[in-house]
Image: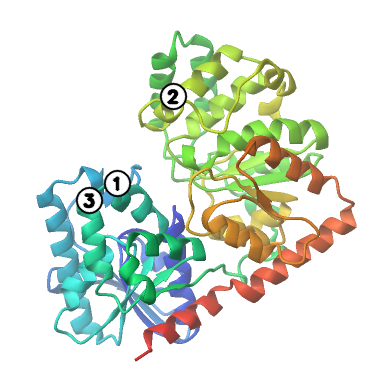
Amino acid sequence: MTHGYMFSGSGSNVYVQNLCRALVREGHEVHLLCQEPRPLAYDFVDAHFLADGAKLRRIGERKTPYPGRCVVYNPEIGDLLPVYVYDEYPGWRVKTFLDLTEEELERYVALNAGAVRAVLERAGAEAAVTNHSVPGPLIARRALEGTGVSYLSIVHGSCLQYVARRSGRYMELAREGLSGARRILALSSHSAGTVEEDFPELAPRTVSLPGGVDTQLFRPEALDPDALSALRGGEGRGPQQREALARALGEAGGAEELAASLRRIAASYDARVHDRDAGERIGRLLASGGPLVVYVGKLIHSKGVHSLLQAFVRVRRATGARLLVVGFGTFREGLEALALALGTGDGRAVELLAGLGRLLEGKTPGPLEHFEPSEELLREAAGLHESVEFVGPLYHEELAKLLPAADAGTVPSIFPETFGLVAAELAASGVVPFVADHSGLREAGAIVGRGLPFGLLVGMDRFQEKLAEALVRYLSLPEEERRRCRRVVRENTVRHLGWDTLASRLVGLAREG
C-alpha cells in the first residue's frame, strides 16, 4: 500500500492508519510506504524500514497483539514534501503540488517508484493499493509495470479538488495513473460521481466504498475524564498566546497589521500538539453546566468553523450550550480572534476579520463565506468567548475518551468532502452529528441518521441559521429521547461503517480476477 504522508493530522492519514489496523486485525500482511516518522508508536506496526532506492534498511521491529503483520517503509525523498493543501510539517520543506517544478515532480515520482519496486521485491505482494488520485496511482503504474501485480486506487478528496481540477498537467497525470488501476475506490457515492465526471471512461471500474470508523475505539463507554486531565505541558499553544491575541485585537491599526500579528502568534508554538493547558480547560468545560457541542477537524476556512461560531451564538443563548473546538490549522488564530471579538463586542475587529477571510490562513484576502456580521449578532454574542474553547489537536486515543461527553457534534464544512469520517466517529461515540448537506457528508449523515425522527443534514442556503435551528431543536428534546437518538446513531455506525467491514470489502476487491 502506498500513502505519501503520516498517520495523523488529516482525514486521509487517519483513514490509512485505521484501514491498516483493520487489515492486520483480520490476519492480513500489509507493506505500507509512507512518511510517518514514528510508526512503531502505533500498535499495529511490526517493523520500520527506510527505503533508499533499491536498498531497504531496518530501523526497528517489535511484536504486536494482532494476528496479521504491518511493515512500514519510509521512501527516501529528500527534504521536499509535496502536499495538496499547504500546511507546516516540522523537518520538511513543504510545497503544494501546484507549485512544484517539473524536475521536482519527476524526482518525487521516480524516488517513490523505486521504493515501491524494492518493497515489492522483498514482500512478494499479491496486489497493491494506492491512496490519492495523483501521484499515487502514477507511481504504482510505473513501479509495477511488467511485474504482473495489479493495483487498486483509493481516491481521497483533496487531490482532485485542490490539485487535479486546477491543473491540466495534473489531470492528465491522474488519468494516466488511474487508467492503469484494476479498480478505483471512492469513499462515497458523491466521490464516485466526481471521479466519473472527471474520467467518464473509468466509470465502469469505479465503486463506492464508504467508511469507516474504529467502533472498538470510539464507543460511548470510552469516556475517561481523568485521562483527559493529563493533557498538559509541552510545546503547544498556551496562556501567553491567548494574551498576545487579545493585545493584537486591541492594538491593530488595520487589517494588514492584524494579520501580521496573528501570523507571529501562530509561529510561536507547535500547532500539531494539544494546548499546554488543554486538560485543565477541558475539565472545566465538562464540569460546567449546559450541553456540550463539539467540532473536530482541520482549522481552515473550507471547514466552516467561522459559520459554526455564528450559529453557536444563537445556540448558546437558547440552550446555555458550550462549544469545544478540537484541531489545528492555519486558520486557528483567525477563528480564536473572531470568537474573542464577537464575545467582547469589538465590532471593528469582527469587520476586519470577516473582510480578511482567507488571508488569515495564508491565502489571498476575501470575505468569509457563510458569515454575516451585524449589530444584532454582536449584541447576542456578548460573552461568547467564555463558552468556547479551542484546545488544539487530539489524536485518536485521546479523542475517543472525550467525544462521549458531547451532547451533539457538527461537521460544518462549506467545501465538498469525500466522506464524513468525523461524523462517523462522533456517531460511534454515541454523539448525534449535524452535517452540511452536500458531497460525501450527505451520505455519511444519511447512514448514521437512519431511524431518527429528524434529519442530520443542514442545508447550505442560510446555513448558519439552519445549523443553529437544528442544534437548538435537538438539544431542547427531553433527555430520554436524546439518549435513544444516541443509541440509534451508534448502532447505525457499527452496522454499516466499521473498519472491519471496509477492510473485508477491500480484500475481496483485491482478490477479484
| Quarter where residue 293 is shown | top right
Crowding at label 1, few (<14), some or many (≥20) Cα neighbours within 10 Å? few
* Side of 161 relative to 19 (left or right): left
CA distance for labels 2 and 3: 35 Å
* Side of 426 relative to 369 (left or right): right
Mark closer to the observer (2, 3): 3
Residue 92 in the image: state x and y as whole percent: 26, 47
Residue, far bottom: 513
Label disc, if present, on residue 262 of the rendered structure: 2
Q: Which residue is mark 3?
A: 168
The residue positioned 17% from the left and 85% from the top of the image is: 147
Residue 7 in the image: state x and y as whole percent: 41, 61
Query: Which amino acid type corresponds to the residue marked 2 in the rendered image?
Result: Leu
Count how many numbered circles sit on residues in the image. 3
Q: Which residue is mark 1?
A: 166
* Side of 357 relative to 147 (left or right): right
> Quarter of the image containing the N terminus?
bottom left
* Upstream in sequence: badge 2 or badge 1: 1
Residue 25 in the image: state x and y as whole percent: 50, 81
* Upstream in sequence: badge 2 or badge 3: 3
Q: Is residue 475 visible?
A: yes
The residue positioned 35% from the left and 42% from the top of the image is: 87
Q: Nearer the viewer, residue 375 or 94?
A: 375
Label disc, if present, on residue 123 of the rendered structure: none
Element type where label 3 sits in the image: helix
> Quarter of the image containing the C terminus?
bottom left
| Quarter where residue 99 is shown | top left
CA distance for labels 2 and 1: 29 Å
Seen in the picture, residue 123 relative to 466 is either above or below; the reply is below
